[in-house]
């Protein structure tokens, strides 16, 4: 996993990879947003919904902890070995949105995510145990790793997915 010199570098990478990811959807037709293609595990709409769901979860864990609430990871009603069902809840939550609305929601959520991350003291971003929710798994990751694994990493991997989806869609698969 790539590391970061400081919080500014992490935020810059979140913003850069988010823009590259969402720009891939500019030429996807609304009529194709739910089109499933062999060889790609998600539809275009599901790819964006996945990102929206995870960004929202990370922010909510931190807000809940700050409010003194018990934080349940990954999410109330889901265990780590039930991520498929959690992802389906993301897809269902955003199913009625158009592709343009999903893109707008994504851009808004990335701005919220960056604002949230920017509001965390530098030391807390890089120190394991600074947030209870970040220490909730045996890995005891610092906040930056959670931010990276739920933004930069999937923005990159899902960019590859949407590119593959577009290529297969264009070839009639």
Image (cartoon, grey):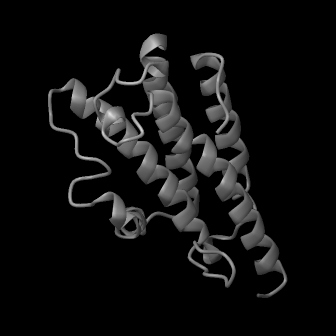
Q: Give the quadrant of the C terminus.
A: bottom right
Residue farthest along the front direction in this orientation: 138
From the viewer's perspective, is residue 44 above or below residue 103?
Answer: below
| Quarter assignment of residue 84 | bottom left
- Viewer-proximal residue, 10 or 33? 10
15 relative to 77 in the view: left or right? right
| Quarter assignment of residue 77 | bottom left
Residue farthest along the bottom direction in this orientation: 173
From the viewer's perspective, is residue 86 above or below residue 17?
Answer: below
61 relative to 58 in the view: left or right? left
- Viewer-proximal residue, 141 or 6? 141
Q: Could you tell me which residue is drawn at 51 percent across and 52 percent down?
A: 51
Rendered location of residue 87, percent (x, y): 41, 64
Can see residue 101? no
- Viewer-proximal residue, 43 or 96? 43
151 relative to 171 in the view: left or right? left
Can see residue 20? yes
The number of callouts visible is: 0
Rendered location of residue 19, percent (x, y): 69, 41
Residue farthest along the right direction in this orientation: 171
From the viewer's perspective, is residue 41 above or below residue 125?
Answer: below
Q: Could you tell me which residue is drawn at 53 percent across and 47 percent down?
A: 106
Rendered location of residue 47, percent (x, y): 57, 62
| Quarter assignment of residue 40 | bottom right
Q: Could you tell me which residue is drawn at 35 percent across and 20 percent down?
A: 130
142 relative to 71 in the view: left or right? right
- Viewer-proximal residue, 32 or 84? 84
Q: Give the quadrant of the N terminus.
A: top right
From the viewer's perspective, is residue 62 above or below residue 36?
Answer: above
């Amino acid at each position: 996993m790539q590391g970061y010199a400081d919080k500014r570098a992490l935020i810059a990478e979140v913003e850069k990879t988010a823009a590259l990811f969402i720009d891939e959807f500019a030429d996807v037709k609304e009529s194709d947003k739910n089109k499933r293609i062999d060889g790609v595990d998600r539809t275009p709409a599901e790819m964006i919904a996945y990102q929206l769901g995870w960004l929202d979860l990370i922010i909510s864990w931190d807000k809940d902890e700050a409010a003194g609430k018990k934080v349940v990871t990954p999410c109330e009603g889901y265990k780590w070995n039930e991520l498929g069902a959690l992802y389906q809840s993301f897809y269902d939550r955003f199913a009625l949105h158009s592709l343009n609305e999903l893109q707008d929601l994504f851009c808004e959520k990335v701005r919220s995510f960056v604002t949230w991350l920017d509001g965390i003291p530098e030391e807390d971003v890089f120190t394991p145990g600074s947030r209870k929710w970040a220490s909730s798994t045996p890995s005891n990751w610092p906040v930056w790793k959670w931010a990276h694994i739920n933004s930069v990493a999937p923005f990159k991997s899902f960019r590859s997915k949407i590119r593959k989806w577009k290529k297969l869609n264009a070839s009639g698969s």
